[in-house]
Each structure stands twice: as C-alpha cells, then as structure tokens.
Image (cartoon, coloured by chain):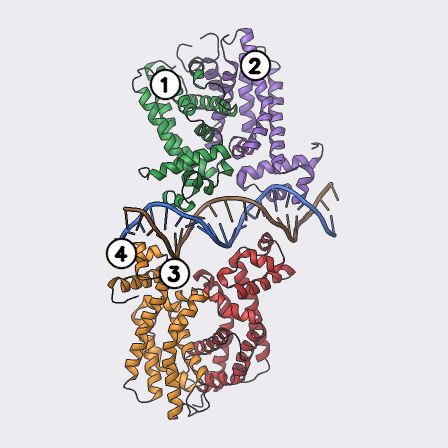
Chain colours: A orange, B red, C purple, D green, E blue, F brown
Amino acid sequence: MKSSRPKYMQIIDAAVIVIAQNGYHQAQVSKIAKQAGVADGTIYLYFKNKEDILISLFREKMGYFVEQIQEGIKGKSSAVDKLFVLIQKHFQILSEDPNLAIVTQLELRQSNKELRHRINDVLKGYLDLVDRIVIEGKETGEFRSTLNVKLMKNMIFGTMDEVATTWVINDQKYSLTDLVPEVHRLLTNGCSSSN
Amino acid sequence: MKSSRPKYMQIIDAAVIVIAQNGYHQAQVSKIAKQAGVADGTIYLYFKNKEDILISLFREKMGYFVEQIQEGIKGKSSAVDKLFVLIQKHFQILSEDPNLAIVTQLELRQSNKELRHRINDVLKGYLDLVDRIVIEGKETGEFRSTLNVKLMKNMIFGTMDEVATTWVINDQKYSLTDLVPEVHRLLTNGCSSSN
Amino acid sequence: MKSSRPKYMQIIDAAVIVIAQNGYHQAQVSKIAKQAGVADGTIYLYFKNKEDILISLFREKMGYFVEQIQEGIKGKSSAVDKLFVLIQKHFQILSEDPNLAIVTQLELRQSNKELRHRINDVLKGYLDLVDRIVIEGKETGEFRSTLNVKLMKNMIFGTMDEVATTWVINDQKYSLTDLVPEVHRLLTNGCSSSN
Amino acid sequence: MKSSRPKYMQIIDAAVIVIAQNGYHQAQVSKIAKQAGVADGTIYLYFKNKEDILISLFREKMGYFVEQIQEGIKGKSSAVDKLFVLIQKHFQILSEDPNLAIVTQLELRQSNKELRHRINDVLKGYLDLVDRIVIEGKETGEFRSTLNVKLMKNMIFGTMDEVATTWVINDQKYSLTDLVPEVHRLLTNGCSSSN
DNA sequence: AATGAATGAGGTTTCATTCAT
DNA sequence: CATGAATGAAACCTCATTCAT
C-alpha cells in the first residue's frame, strides 16, 4: 500500500488509538473505521485485510524506530555509546506515544502465531541494528571476544522489552528514560560488583 | 485444587498437547476433551470454564518451576551460584517438555488481557524467587550495592524469556541448556571486555 | 409411581420449593435432588423423567384442590353457594402455600406445549367440578337457562386464575381470601348496576 | 424503533410463523432468519438479541390491539358499548391471524420470567384501556358504584384470555367472534338468572 | 473512490439421563 | 435401593469481508 495516500496513515493512527483504548480483541474493523472517519469498506481499499493493518502499523512505527536510532548512532564512535543511544531512543519513542507503547508492548502480543511471525520479520530490521552494534563492539575490543552475538542480542532486546513492558503495565507512571543509564550499565557490566 | 483427581491433570496435559499442536486459537474445548479421552461435559466437572483450564495449566506448571528451582538453590551458598541454578532449571524444564515450551513461550501470550493478568499473578511467585536472589547478592556484596533490583529482575527474566522464545521459534533445534553458562556470564558481567 | 413411598412426596415437595425459589428454568434435577436430600439418580427410581416430576406435582396438588372443594360443597344445597365455596377454597389453598402459588400461577406456565397439555388433562378433573356446578345452577333455575356452560366455565376459571396471578405477581402482599365475596358477586351478577 | 425499515417487520412476521409452527423452544434464530429470507447475522442488525425479537413482536402486535380498540370505542358513548367493542376487537384480531393467536395465547407464555416481565410492561397499555372503561362505567352509573375496578379488570381480561386460549387449544375450529355477545353478557350480568 | 448493509461460519457451556458400583 | 461421575447434543451471537450502488 502506498503511504502517500493520506487515509493510509489516518487508518493506522486510528488503529493505534482503538487498540490502545479497547484492547486487541475489542478492536473491530468497524471501530477502527469509525475512529478514522471512514466507512468500513474503505479500509479494504488501503489494506488487504485486518492483519495487514496491524503489520503495516508495526512496520510504519518500527521503521521510525530504526530511522531514529540510525540517526542517533551516526555521530557515536564507540559501540558502548551506540548501545546507549539505542536504549535511549527506544525508551524515548515509547515514552512519546503512550498509546503506541500499549499497543506494541501489550496488545499486539495477543495476535496469532501467523501474525507474530510476520511482525518478527519486521523486527528483523531493528534486531540487525542491534547485531551490528554488538559485532562492532567485539571488533573494537570494547566487548569481550568470546561474546555470543545472538545471546547478547537476546539480552539487549529481552531486557529493554521487559523493562518497557513492566513500565506499561504500571501505567507508565514513572519516567522510562530515567532508567536508561542503569539499563545500559547492566547490559555492559552485568550485576557483579567486580566490574 | 482438584489435582488429586486423576482426570484433572489428564485434562491439563491434554490442553498442553492440543495448544502446542493447534495453536491457542484453535484449541477448542472439544479437541482438548477428545485428547484427554473424556466427554466435553466432563471438562466442566473439573474446571469452571475454558479460561480456568489455562490458568490452572499455568499454575500447575509454574508451580513445578518454582518448586524445582527452590530445590536446586537450596544447596547453593552464593547468589551467583543460585542465579546459575535458576537459569539452568528454567532452561532444563523447558527443554524437557517441548510442548510446554511452545505453550508458555508462544501460545499463552495470545490470551486476552484478563487472562494474562491472572497469569501474571501466578508469575509473581516465580519473580519473587528472582527478587530474593538479587537482594541476597547485594547483601553478600557479590552484586554491586547500587544495583536497581527491579531492573535487574527485568534483565534476568527478560533475557531468559527472549533466549527461550528465540529457541522455540527456531523449533528447539539446538540445545537450550548448553547456553546456560554464557547467559549466566552475560547477566553477571555484561558484554564488556573489561570484566 | 407409588405415592406410598415416602421419598416420592419428599421429591415433589422439594420440587415445589426449588421451582418457587429459582424459577422453572433454573430448577435443575440436581437442585431438586439436593433439596430432597437424595442423589440425582434416585429421582429416576421414583419418576420416569423430569417432566414426570412436574406432572406428578401438579396431579398431587390439584387432587388436593378437588378433594377440598368437593368436601366443602358437600353441605351446600345451592349452586350459588357452591360457587362461593369453590372460590373460597381455591383462594384459600393458594394462600396457605405461597410457594405452591408461585409454582402453579407463574412458573409451571413456562413449561412446553407437551407438558402443558398433560397438565391440562389433570386440570380436567377440576374443571369438571366447575362444570357440574354451572349445570346444576341452570337446572335449579339459579342461573339463566340460556347460559353457555363452556363460556361460564371459562369465565369462572379465567377470573379466579387472573385474580390469583395478579396477587402472586404483587408478591402476595394483600389477602387473597378477602376478595372472595366480590369475585363471587362479579361472577354471579357481573358489573352492571342493574343487578 | 427501526420499524421504518422493511426487514424489521419482515423478521417479526417470520418469528410469528416460526414460533406458531415449531413452538417457542424450537424457534431458533436460524429458523427465523431462514423464514425471513435473510442471513442469521442480519437479525442482529435489527434486534439486540433473540429476546428483543420477541418483545418487539409483542409490542408491535399489542400496539395494533390498542390502536384498533381505541379506534373502535371512539364512537361509542356508553361503557357497556365500549366493553362490547373491546371484546369484539380482541377476538377479531386473534381470529384474523391464527398464527399470532397461537403465539400470544400459548407459545409466548413459556418465556422466562425476565421476558414475561417485559411483556407485562407492554400489556400495561392494554390493561389501562380496560381500566378506563370500567372507571367510566362507574361514573356514568352503568356499573355499580361498589365495583372493585382491579377485580373487574381481572375478570374482563381473565375471561377473554381463557376463552381465547380454549379456542386456540381446540385448534380454532369454531368461530371466536360468535362468542362476543355471550361473553359480553356474562361480564355485565354474570350467570345469575335474576338479571 | 467511497459507502455500509448484508453475509454466514464457528465454539463454549448446560443439564437431563445413565449405569457401574 | 441408592449413588454421583460421566455423558454429549444443541444454539446464540460476533465480526471480518464483500459488493451493489
């Protein structure tokens, strides 16, 4: 679908709001259409089916994630600094759109296996960014040479995701971005006191 | 708890198999009943409704998690060793029951908010275990004194969960337990080469 | 079924209570069994099926109606007086057992056509009593000779039934028997002022 | 009220036919939809749920009752004449639609207490009509001044209802409207020969 | 391009009845 | 006689998608 058409983003934004407010299973196509100010049938002029709305939503928003992070790490020379920016941007974007945070951290997880596989494909682009930072860190010697890149990627993403989800579950009532330094420290040095 | 009656566990075990093989949304009560070798109505002699099957399933299995880990860390004197056992047992239990791994890592995540809240209550018991290990580590000086316990808990659980989910998505085709030492090292020392 | 067995009436009485308290559609066999202090299966030693309980209930109680009224009109020589006794006994019996009143006036009406036909058969015995009084009235000249017996029977039964039902719907909060004289007067003389 | 849309009445008319032919408990939504020539789901565009169909059915038809009777008594100056018209119209409407007669006299009585309460609310409008006639009769001196209005209302409605139900049970095989004069005479003068 | 009325498949749960003990 | 665990059929309603206008 061509994102040039104004109603395309209009519908995606409506989907974010409807899902955040009603939950994944109560986000019927008719509700999204109403929120977007279009007829039910119009949805199908821009999206193949309901699943396509969700995947497109995820792709558009995740694209913004990758874009922002790539922009941010451009000026950083060390992998350690780049990791910091990654965490910072990740938490910042979620903080800036409370509805999006609810949708990505909670609601979209309830989608079926099929849809989640498609979402994972979109996530690939993001995880590749993480991958590259980790590999760079090994090459520059900042990270230890025996590091398992895949596991490190799991730890980085798993930790950020769990921290963000906990924050959303607690109604986003504290500052997520304030946690960036400590999360960064934990990822680089772990919990041990000998670091 | 009616776990003393044999059909109770029989139905829960059937649910694990059916959900793992058909997916959460295709796990109809009639399929579970057939797999358990009982009539549809018999399900309702042991469970209030379908949701009750899933919560009970989670509670029974998660109870086994907590039990096994508590047993395992009993003999360990340091928090670092206890953390090792935690990861080991967690991965070991998932490895021992491929179907259960699929159900807990993928399928049960698609349940609605209501059910997920109930599941989170059950998870509390597990997360409290993690909490205690982290706090103990701070007290013994193994972990640094400035450690944010909640974030550390997020990192431990988020990492294990992400590693396990990745393993399930990849069809469990490598050894999850082989990853225990590296995951443990990452959690304690992070990725930095200076540790 | 032999009413000599004590559990027979025990189950019928339980049915009256359960239906009155829970309504016809919430009066499951298991509830009746529990109220009667017997096992579900025991019900089927005394009754062919659930419908049989209800028909038996109606027959037993309606038999008491007929019995009481026959007893009462025995000493009366005029049809007018017999009609008075009929109304009086009818209202009196309903007043004496509030639960039975609820069951016969409201709950048993919800039974299906089949059951209601069977109940009507039982009612025949009662309506024959009414019939005989009306015919007698015509013969003695108390009632006008052009009277349509069937319609008069309809009026007598329809009026008493409607008055009783209204009283039950209003939670039996006024005296039904106090209305006997006026109902009797209405049935004999109508509403007209010229009588 | 969506009665302006043609499918609304189409579905109600289908419900009357299906209930009359199959009985209340065998009148599934799918049968009504088929009879109305629409899809099952279409029903729910016009009615909230199945109960709503039945209440609407009753309201629409009962509205016609009240309308017809009000129209008929408009030209009558005496309460006695108005009562005659009431009976006449009541019996006439039932005679004109044999299916509706079955539904209102037999089938709808089996509905649960909740639904019957809702139906009684609709009946109020009809009974108020009766009320007004009786009161007027007392005021004009046609009816005796000591008349209990509520009981008289019970007698009028109870009698008409019982006569109509008896006629339906006997498969409507005689003329109901032929009975109007005698029913009217019974209600005004009772059975006594001295009137 | 846009509409929105119509479609129709699909599943949880209840409860009268049975029968092995 | 008595038990009560087990059975299994049956139906209301939702909602993604279509297509005539």
Q: Are marks 4 and 2 on the same chain?
A: no
Residue type, mark 3 in image? Gly
Image vertical order of residue D99 relative to residue C144, above or below: below
- The range drawn in magenta is C99-107
Asked if one can make out residue D74 in the rendered structure from this viewpoint, the answer is yes
Q: Are the residues flagged by discs 1 and 3 in contact, CB closer than 8 Å?
A: no
Q: Are marks 1 and 3 on the same chain?
A: no
Residue type, mark 4 in image? Gly
Mark 4 chain:
A
Tag shown at residue D85: 1
Q: Of helix, strand and loop, which one carries label 1? A: helix
Taking depth in this image into account, of D136 and C123 the one nearest to the observer is C123
Residue type, mark 1 in image? Val
Q: Nearer the viewer, mark 3 or mark 4?
A: 4
CA gap between label 4 and label 2 equals 74 Å
Residue type, mark 2 in image? Ile
Q: Of helix, strand and loop, which one carries label 3? A: loop
The x and y percentages for residue A163 are 40, 74
CA gap between label 3 and label 2 equals 70 Å
* Residue A62 is covered by the magenta coloring: no
Taking depth in this image into account, of D124 and C168 the one nearest to the observer is D124
Q: Nearer the viewer, mark 2 or mark 1?
A: 1
Q: Sort mark 2 into few (<14), some (14-19) or many (20+) by Cα contacts within 10 Å.
A: many
Q: Which residue is mark 3?
A: A23
Q: State which quadrant residue A31 falls in.
A: bottom left
Image vertical order of residue A91 relative to residue B2, above or below: below
Q: Of helix, strand and loop, which one carries label 4? A: loop
CA gap between label 1 and label 3 equals 59 Å
Q: Nearer the viewer, mark 4 or mark 2?
A: 4
Q: Which residue is mark 2?
A: C133
